[in-house]
Amino acid sequence: MVFTLNVNGMDHEVDADPETPLLWILRENIKLTGTKFGCGIAECGVCSVHIDGQLTKSCIVPAASAVGRRITTIEGLSADTSHPVQRAWIEKAVAQCGYCQSGQIMAAAALLARNPDPNDRDIDQAMEGNLCRCGTYIEIRSAIHRAAELAGDKEGGV
């Protein structure tokens, strides 16, 4: 079946089974490999994307359910790593192995979009669905605080 998905502001015509998880459509059909496969059961957060601005685990979302909606992947957060969360991640050197980081960044961006000045508890709650095997949780929290500062420095925030 052919359907159209709007990903990172561009329409992509996809010929696939509509029940295929969005993750695989993004990676295999649209060739956006920043969104990773982790557990396949929406427990690790590695596959996180935004659908209409809401954090979504793409491994369990049938692709057809995203038709007519705005999908944002890590590649669409900014073209030049200028998004405050990306800038903070780099500044704070958060990543170790890096495998989970696109999901972590997408979760942090979603948090800051709805709460521009989160406290530690807000951050911990928002990020609890994203696992990091390297244990960079303290660095992640620090980077989210820094991203909030960076977003506050520019008009319009995150």
Image (tube, rainbow, N blue to C red):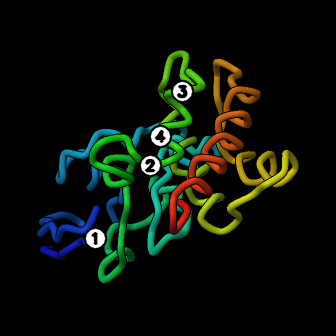
Q: Nearer the viewer, residue 21 or 139?
A: 139
- Secondary-structure class at tag 4: helix
- Calculate the distance from the C-alpha at mark 4 to the C-alpha at mark 3: 9 Å
Where is residue 145 drawn, in percent x and y? 71, 43
Q: Are marks 4 and 3 in contact (CB under 8 Å)?
A: no
- Secondary-structure class at tag 2: loop
Whichever of callouts 1 and 4 sits on the residue coming sooner in the sequence is 1
Q: Are marks 2 and 3 in contact (CB under 8 Å)?
A: no
Q: What amino acid is labelled 1 in the image? A: Pro
Whichever of callouts 2 and 3 sits on the residue coming sooner in the sequence is 2
- Calculate the distance from the C-alpha at mark 1 to the C-alpha at mark 2: 32 Å
Q: Which residue is mark 1?
A: 18
**Mark toward the viewer: 1 or 4:** 4
Tell me what residue is drawn at x 47 percent, y 46 percent: 47
Tell me what residue is drawn at x 18 percent, y 75 percent: 4
- Secondary-structure class at tag 3: helix
Q: Nearer the viewer, residue 103 or 26?
A: 103
Q: Are marks 1 and 3 in contact (CB under 8 Å)?
A: no
Q: Is residue 72 above or below residue 36?
A: below
Q: Which residue is mark 2?
A: 83
Q: Is residue 68 above or below residue 72?
A: below
**Mark toward the viewer: 1 or 3:** 3
